[in-house]
Image (spheres, grey):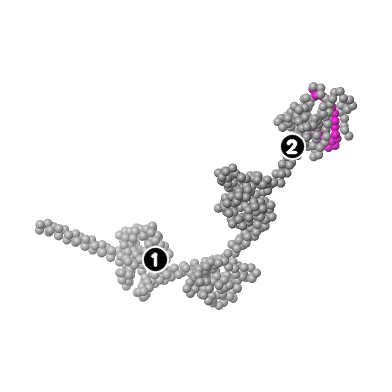
């Protein structure tokens, strides 16, 4: 038992001794590598020393670790070190990172100031050791470290440069209106508006005095005008005021272009509105969310919907439902058909293919067209074509009556246009020549009709006279003559000129037993 405990104690003692030995060696190694190059009277605990193995920080003093930023977290130690010091020590990375073993280098924050901060670096045993040295640290207050003060000075210089070079007008203002600070953009505006003399004394004038920004009790954003140098024009600015306990911080950016664009847009919209107001065609424009965005008075007249309802910006579906309730849309067979009709109406308008004629129960007829507009909007045009449809129907009825009259006379009649095309013929003509121009192209022109007539009749010089009379464009006089068909039927042919250069050709069967007083052919004066 005694030997067992003795061995355990001996082992523990050996382990502790080894640990102490390693710790001592590490402490000696750390003191060797972290000792400063040239620190003067600096105490070890105040030193700023970094020890890098390639890009990894293997050791550093407490003050040195405090100088390394935590961000970006994804960057390595060397990158974050360079980010912290490269703005103040130019060429740091290129000069330090490539040092060979035993070489050393030094960079001054200000090469012209021997008392400025400097970084010293040396490659020792493959490790890069960097120390920040403040030559006059012993003469500074212990409360303000030189490095921190220099960093604040650098940041202040940067902020001043940003404020002075910013194109945004920036100023601080007390609640009594006194300008306590202003950047160059603000002062330049005063020069252009009020002249150089306005800046001979401090504080500068408040060019936004009429807006009373100094009395703002909370943050605000406002667009305000100020008189321009010509006094007849105005300069517009978008102003942001950040309220403070004693002073307000204000920013202003020019808004002249925006104001001009908005004014031009308003004028354009007013012009369109006036134009739409005089249209007899109803117009409804729905935005990308299918809410009614614009309509004209004619839409009210055509749909019968009250202006208040349309001004409430109803959705497309609500608009169509309202039309259905007032029977201003063709009534579908069922609700399913109605919803399908709405879907087709919307989809057709989006791709520009929707066009329908609505026959309303009131007897009116509307032509409705859908067209896409920019930014996903769609426009519907409602046109009352009731009169047009009525006139078309009346005209078609007159044509049908005229054709019926022609079909009920025994004389075969054919009319040809100026260019010789067959315009119309009657039933007697179709029966006589056993050819229907509506179903056969063989007699669709005068030339083809003449060939048909000659093929069914005996040879006669009268056909040349008929052709000359029809094809002669000037000096045409009525012509009449007889022709004989192959079966012996005698026809009296008459050729008369019509308006617009047309020609009427008619054929009458002659009774073989009647008096043959009519010559075989003659000109009718």
- Local packing at callout 2 (Cα closer than 10 Å; few below 14, some 14-19, many 20+) is few
Looking at this view, is 415 or 65 the one in front?
A: 415
Q: Secondary structure at mark 1?
A: strand
Most extreme residue toward the top, as rendered?
A: 487
Q: Is residue 101 visible?
A: no
Is 173 rendered above or below residue 4?
below
- Residue 400 is marked as 2
Is 216 rendered above or below residue 373?
below
Looking at this view, is 279 or 338 the one in front?
A: 338
Q: Earlier in the sequence, mark 1 or mark 2?
A: 1
Q: Is residue 196 visible?
A: yes
Indicate the position of residue 13 as horizontal and vertical percent values: 17, 61
Name which residue lies at 65% across and 59% down: 270
- Bounds of the magenta segment: 470-486
- Residue 107 is marked as 1
Indicate the position of residue 92 as horizontal and vertical percent values: 40, 62
Q: Secondary structure at mark 2?
A: helix
Name which residue lies at 55% across and 67% down: 222
Looking at this view, is 34 or 454 the one in front?
A: 454
Q: Is residue 308 left or right of residue 221?
A: right
């Amino acid at each position: 038992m005694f030997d067992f405990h003795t061995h355990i104690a001996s082992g523990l003692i050996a382990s502790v001794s080894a640990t102490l030995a390693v710790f001592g060696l590490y402490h000696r190694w750390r003191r060797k590598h972290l000792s400063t190059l040239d620190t003067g009277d600096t105490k070890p605990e105040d030193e700023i020393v970094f020890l890098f193995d390639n890009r990894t920080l293997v050791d550093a003093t407490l003050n040195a670790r405090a100088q390394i930023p935590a961000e970006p977290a994804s960057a390595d130690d060397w990158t974050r070190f360079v980010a912290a010091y490269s703005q103040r020590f130019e060429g740091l990375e290129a000069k330090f990172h490539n040092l060979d073993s035993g070489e050393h280098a030094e960079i001054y924050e200000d090469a012209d100031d021997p008392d400025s901060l400097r970084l010293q670096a040396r490659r020792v045993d493959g490790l890069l050791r960097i120390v920040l040295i403040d030559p006059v640290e012993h003469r500074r207050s212990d409360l303000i470290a030189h490095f921190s003060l220099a960093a604040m000075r650098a940041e202040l210089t940067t902020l001043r440069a940003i404020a002075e070079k910013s194109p945004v007008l920036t100023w601080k203002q007390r609640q009594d209106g006194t300008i306590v600070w202003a950047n160059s953009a603000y002062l330049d505006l005063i020069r252009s508006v009020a002249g150089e003399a306005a800046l001979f004394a401090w504080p500068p004038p408040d060019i936004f005095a009429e807006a009373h920004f100094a009395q703002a009790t909370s943050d605000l954003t406002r667009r305000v005008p100020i008189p321009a140098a010509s006094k007849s024009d105005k300069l517009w600015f978008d102003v942001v005021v950040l309220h403070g306990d004693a002073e307000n911080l204000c920013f202003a950016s020019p808004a002249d272009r925006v104001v001009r664009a908005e004014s031009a847009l308003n004028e354009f919209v007013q012009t369109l509105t006036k134009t739409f107001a005089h249209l007899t065609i109803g117009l409804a424009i729905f935005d990308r969310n299918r809410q009614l965005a614009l309509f004209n008075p004619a839409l009210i007249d055509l749909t019968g919907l009250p202006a208040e309802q349309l001004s409430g910006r109803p959705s497309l579906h609500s608009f169509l439902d309202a039309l259905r309730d007032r029977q201003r849309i063709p009534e579908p067979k069922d609700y399913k058909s109605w919803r399908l009709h709405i879907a087709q109406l919307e989809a057709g308008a989006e791709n520009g293919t929707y066009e329908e004629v609505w026959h309303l129960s009131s007897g009116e007829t509307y032509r409705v067209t859908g067209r896409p507009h920019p930014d996903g909007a769609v426009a519907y045009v409602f046109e009352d074509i009731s009169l047009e449809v009525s006139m078309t129907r009346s005209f078609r009825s007159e044509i049908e009556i005229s054709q019926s009259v022609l079909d009920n006379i025994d004389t075969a009649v054919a009319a040809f246009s100026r260019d010789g095309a067959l315009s119309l013929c009657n039933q007697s003509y179709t029966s006589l020549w056993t050819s229907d121009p509506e179903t056969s192209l063989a007699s669709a022109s005068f030339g083809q009709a003449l060939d048909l007539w000659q093929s069914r009749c005996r040879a006669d010089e009268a056909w040349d006279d008929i052709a000359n009379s029809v094809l002669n464009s000037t000096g045409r006089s009525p012509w009449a003559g007889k022709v004989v068909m192959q079966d012996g039927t005698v026809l009296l042919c008459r050729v008369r000129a019509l308006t617009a250069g047309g020609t009427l050709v008619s054929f009458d069967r002659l009774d073989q037993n009647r008096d043959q007083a009519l010559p075989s052919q003659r000109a009718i004066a």
